[in-house]
Image (spheres, rainbow, N blue to C red):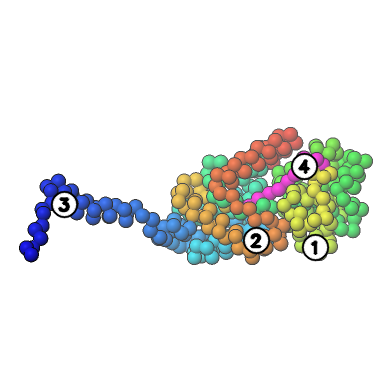
Amino acid sequence: MSARRRIPDPPSLRRTTAMLRHLLPAALAVTLAAAPVPSRAQAPEAALPDRTLHIMAGFAAGGTSDLVARLIADGVGAVTGRRVVVENRTGANGFLAADAVVRGPADGSMLFQCPMGTMTISPELPGMIMPVDPRKDLVPVANVALSSYGAVVRARGPYQDMADVLKAAKAKPNAISYASAGIGTAQHLTGERLQRMAGVQMLHVPYRGAAPAAMDVMAGRADFMVTNLGDVVGQIRGGELRLVALGDASMKPAFPETPLLSDTVPGLEVVGWFGLCGASGMAEPAIRAWARAVETALQDKTLQQRLRENGLTPRFEEPTAFAARIEQDRRAWGEVISAAKVRVD
């Protein structure tokens, strides 16, 4: 038999084959470049400076604000592998710490532990001198926790519930006193709201902080106060103070038998929060990196438990939602300040 003769390819087929040989390597390179490749750029710490990170806390060590700062510092440190240090710079209602952040690098290495009062009440108070403008100089990064408030009275005093306090206040205007951590604080302004909404007149007694105010309530020198639960939860559990009302429902699981303030005064609710803010101009990738690290840290069960033990509810909010909360609360507290004609000198 004769050998089978090979029929040559048509010219058009030869040209197509040559073209494919030329194009395939380039197409493959483009495909590989576009494909997602796992890298450290996707990890929260990638956009943060590769050095010690700082959270500036504006209130003294041992308080609720300081506690939240240290818990989230530990959590973020575990997530990012960075060392996160809390520095306490007290004074000016937290603004000395804020000023340190504003004057520091805006690269994500330093954040301000921003509480509700500093961010929403102080900017609305006539006469308040602030070294920084929270609206212009700070940028919201993440909310960390809600801070429940509660109304407390002396455990062995005459008042069993909030209705008893208001009944006495109606019977003798300005005879019932309420303590606060100072003029223009959330405790003071909540008392102003309570008076207006309940139709009573009470005597405001300001102190230099929640601790001395609580001491005088326990001693009977002030009748009651509405304050951050974290500042008095130890005295409540120790039987020195009686919790007669909760400012909101977030701590109901811990105190199921305690009514809400709104049960006695419809519409009255108070809840604080603690978040993190950076200097204006902080890079967007660093903001997102911190937010992701906080969100991840707050998923830890031990951290959640530590917060709840101190009257706090873990509550992550990303930058946009946190910014909206700040603006909403700023308007609400501004209305209270205006109606009560509160000012600081």
Q: Determine if residue 160 is in view.
A: yes
Closer mark to the observer between disc 4 and disc 2: 2
- Badge 3: how crowded within 10 Å, few (<14), some, or many (20+)? few
Determine which quarter of the picture holds residue 128. Answer: top right
- Residue carrying label 3: 18
**Quadrant the N terminus occupies:** bottom left
The disc, 4 or 3, on the residue closer to the chain's N-terminal end is: 3
Q: Amino acid at mark 3?
A: Ala
Q: Amino acid at mark 2?
A: Gln
Q: Verify whether residue 264 appears in magenta.
A: no
Specify whether 207 is left or right of 57.
right
The disc, 1 or 4, on the residue closer to the chain's N-terminal end is: 1
Real-space Cα separation, disc 2 to disc 1, in angstroms? 20 Å
Q: Are marks 1 and 4 in contact (CB under 8 Å)?
A: no
Which one is in front, 159 or 129? 159
Specify whether 309 is left or right of 103.
right
Residue 307 percent coordinates (x, y): 67, 60
Real-space Cα separation, disc 1 to disc 4, in angstroms? 25 Å
- Residue carrying label 2: 304
The disc, 1 or 3, on the residue closer to the chain's N-terminal end is: 3
Closer mark to the observer between disc 1 and disc 3: 3
Q: Are marks 4 and 2 in contact (CB under 8 Å)?
A: no
Residue at 38% x, 56% y is 36
Residue at 70% x, 35% y is 335
Real-space Cα separation, disc 1 to disc 3, in angstroms? 84 Å
Q: Are marks 3 and 2 in contact (CB under 8 Å)?
A: no
Q: Amino acid at mark 1?
A: Arg
Residue range (magenta):
265-275
Q: Amino acid at mark 4?
A: Leu
Closer mark to the observer between disc 4 and disc 3: 3
